[in-house]
Amino acid sequence: APVAEALAAAFPSFAEVVGLIRDRRDMKLLFEVETHLRLASYAPGRIEFEPAPDAPRELASMLGQRLQLWTGQRWGVSV
């Protein structure tokens, strides 16, 4: 469980995930997350959300791929 502990320490809340997106300067993803993602539940490594009606269909996969690339850990992102 060292991986889970590392994610929990670095990303205790969804605000840190948004901060990572901002730090990586992925403005398109930041806009999509801030505009179209309604958080349902969050745990480090796991994000569940309700998409806004006009959200891009690939938002969950795009967010999961970026987080995995940036953190080196797999994230479960689901609608």
Image (spheres, rainbow, N blue to C red):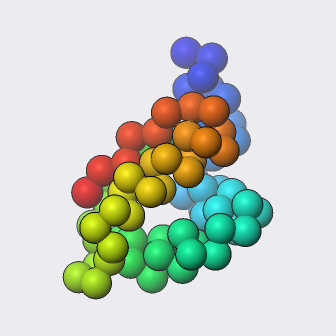
Identify the residue at horizontal 55%, vertical 40% (top origin): 68
Q: Residue most toward the right?
A: 23
- Res 8 visible: no
> Front-most of 43 and 36?
36
Q: Residue furthest top?
A: 1
Figure check: 73 above or below 31: above
Residue sitting at x 49%, y 47%: 65
Q: Is residue 72 left or right of residue 47?
A: right
Quadrant in the picture for residue 55 = bottom left
Residue 74 visible in the displayed image: yes
**Where is residue 45 shown, x and y percent of the image?**
49, 39
In front of the other: 24 or 7: 24
Quadrant of the rendering where the C terminus is positioned: bottom left
Image quadrant for the N terminus? top right
Q: Is residue 22 above or below residue 52?
A: above
Q: Which one is in front, 5 or 27?
A: 27
Query: Residue 54 in the image: x percent, y percent?
Result: 28, 84
Residue 40 as seen in the image, left or right of residue 6? left
**Residue 46 occupies quadrant:** top left
Task: Please tell me which residue is depicted at 36% across the width and 57% down the height of the picture.
Answer: 60
Residue 53 as seen in the image, left or right of residue 22: left
- Name the image quarter holding residue 28: bottom right
Q: How many marks?
A: 0
Give the residue displayed 63% in from the left and 17% down from the top: 2
Q: Position of residue 13 (x, y in %)?
A: 57, 53
